[in-house]
Image: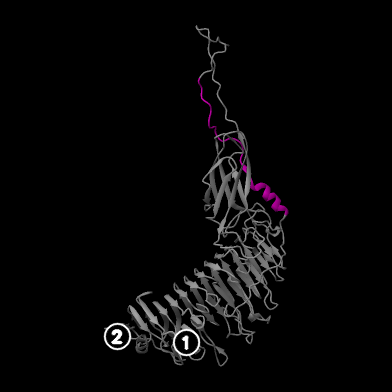
Amino acid sequence: MALVATPASAAELSVCAVGCDHTTVADAVAAAAAGDTITIGAGTFPTFGVVVDKPLTIQGAGVGQTILDGGGASVGSVPGIFRILPGLDAKGSGEIIVRDMSLVNPGKNTTASQYFTISIGIKQATTGITGITLTDLDVEGTGDAARTGYGVYADTGLTGGVPRETPPLTITDSRFSEHVFNGIGVDGWGAPVTISGNDLQEGIGGSSSILVFNEYLPDRIIDPVVITDNVSDGRLVYIRNIDFNATLDTRGGFDDVTIAGNVITGLANVDAGILVSTNSTAATEPTQMGTVRVLDNDIVGDGTSPGTAGVTIGGHVIDAGVQGNSVVGVGTGVNVTQVKNQNPVSVEATDNRLFADDNGVGNTTTTTVDASRNWWGCQTDPALGAPECSGVSGTGGVTTAPWVVARLVSSADSVVEGGTATLTAALDRLSDGEPVGDALPVGGLDVQFSADRGAVDPADTVLDEALTATSTYTAPAGPGADTVTARIDLAEFEIAEPEGDLQLLAFGDAAVRGEAITLPLTITAAAVDPGTGGSGGDSGTGGSGGTGAPGSGTAAGVLPDAGSPVDAGGLAAALALLALGGVAMRMGLRVQPRHRA
């Protein structure tokens, strides 16, 4: 095996309009040796089709300072502002890094007529490239629906039927916008992929912000795909073993997928915030997805589109865990669907906040989905379809018990006129009485207190880290009965007009609160001190047992809290125990695929 030498010391080459080593990025890259650093100054530089085929660091002066303009409608044989393309002969060993610049107005290549900003391809089995990192970039497409393309497109391939050697790919802390297809597309990358900390916009043609798929490798890709801490306007990521090429029915799936800590907003129409699915009719082991973890994501729909889904698990996924997510205002919070007659092996959708959704979980597969320990916005089994409840749908089994229930407790069941009691609302118990898990994402949720007659302060607050909130109740004047109420959780949507025939009160409203929990209190009369009366005296105005005027003692006014605590969650918990093991079966929703989703 031939060894490739790396220079003992790296040089730094500068690019600027006047007074630098080079005036164009292309000249600097051509002149650089492996391991060198190219620094690009502030300014706008026409740049198109620059081939990077050796380890280099290409660094700008910062986003908005260094701007590389791809020329838009220009045509070249090499797509992209940058074409990271290790050649036939390795040119040193090391990493390729592109950072700290804006990339705008990409041009197209002559063959595919697609507008790439950064195109990454591996053409040889041995390249000397140990990693590719893109960081702190602003990657902006043309915004023209007729000029299709991607922000970053990375693909591998085969040489003589043998998979090429791909290095780890890392894309972090960058912004992607105005692309027709995906901001980031990764095809058949047989090495670890990390996409983290980016601000993305779904494709203007309706594609996801990120697409990870495989149109090259016949074996399942064992290297991890990690997508974390990104923010997406519209659908975030679709992961498939193949996209929509029907001739590639036996391409491998992905064995290790983690999608965690992302924020997804603006879902509408038939969007899915996150989709992981096989797309093959073959039931062979390589085409299957392995372990998929969708954790701690915050997903928000528009509150009116029943075709949307927060998370979709489709086809032959061996082990899917959807946990700790907050999914609000979508048609189906977790959508488990059959794809080309393929069904998942195991799906656990637990410890999620499924609130103000038309359906919290939908299942159209032959696999029963474990959907226990979720907050659905209501006190009863979500399968029963309470108005405030995100329900369940589909022909497949969904196990909902135990579910999260809200509690309301008063420090006293009886309060004197003008007296006080402490009200505590909590979201810390399951319907079987057990505590909720640490993964449930409900800390900081809105809590609203109210009373029919008395006063509460504060009326609006939030759950603390212990998943409780308190308010002080002050009893009204006049003995009798009063009712206090707490509602946990709130979702608000900008809805101009109602859309469609939406039957559930918790879907299609501008503001949705959790089911009301009520608690009766008794108001007792304030005690009055009658005084001691006159003691008799020389004036004869009342002897020792006489009828003199009473003394001037004061009434008790406010007495200490009295009575035993009252818990409004007790009855609901008892009823919930009767419904354990409930399975929901209603018609489900299914996201329709679109090109380059």
Query: Looking at the picture, how far across and down is residue 295, in whole percent?
Result: 56, 66
Tag 2 secondary structure: loop
Amino acid at circle 2: Asp
Tell me which label, 1 or 2, sits earlier in the chain: 2
Query: Looking at the picture, how far across and down is residue 109, in whole percent?
Result: 48, 89
Q: Give me the C-alpha separation between circle 1 and circle 2.
A: 29 Å
Which of the pair 40/150 is nearer the observer?
150
- Within the image, what quadrant is residue 30 found in? bottom left
Classify 10 Å Cα crowding around label 2: few (below 14), some (14-19), many (20 and above).
some
Q: Is residue 243 left or right of residue 342?
A: left
Q: Which mark is residue 552?
A: none
Front: mark 1 or 2: 1
Residue range corresponding to the magenta coloring: 552-578
Query: Looking at the picture, how far across and down is residue 428, in whole percent?
Result: 59, 52
- Within the image, what quadrant is residue 420 found in? top right
Amino acid at circle 1: Lys
In the image as oriented, which residue stretches furthest toward the front?
Answer: 497
- Within the image, what quadrant is residue 490 found in? bottom right
Tag 1 secondary structure: strand
Q: Quadrant of the C terminus?
A: bottom right
Q: Is residue 386 left or right of residue 266?
A: right
In this view, 566 is above or below 426? above
Instruction: Work out whether residue 547 can be spotted.
Output: yes
Q: Which residue appears at 69% of the width and 76% of the height? A: 342
Q: Is residue 143 left or right of residue 571?
A: left
In this view, 161 is above or below 15? below
Dots 1, 2 in contact, CB < 8 A: no
Residue tagged 1: 108
Which of the pair 68/190 is nearer the observer?
68
Q: Which mark is residue 21?
A: 2
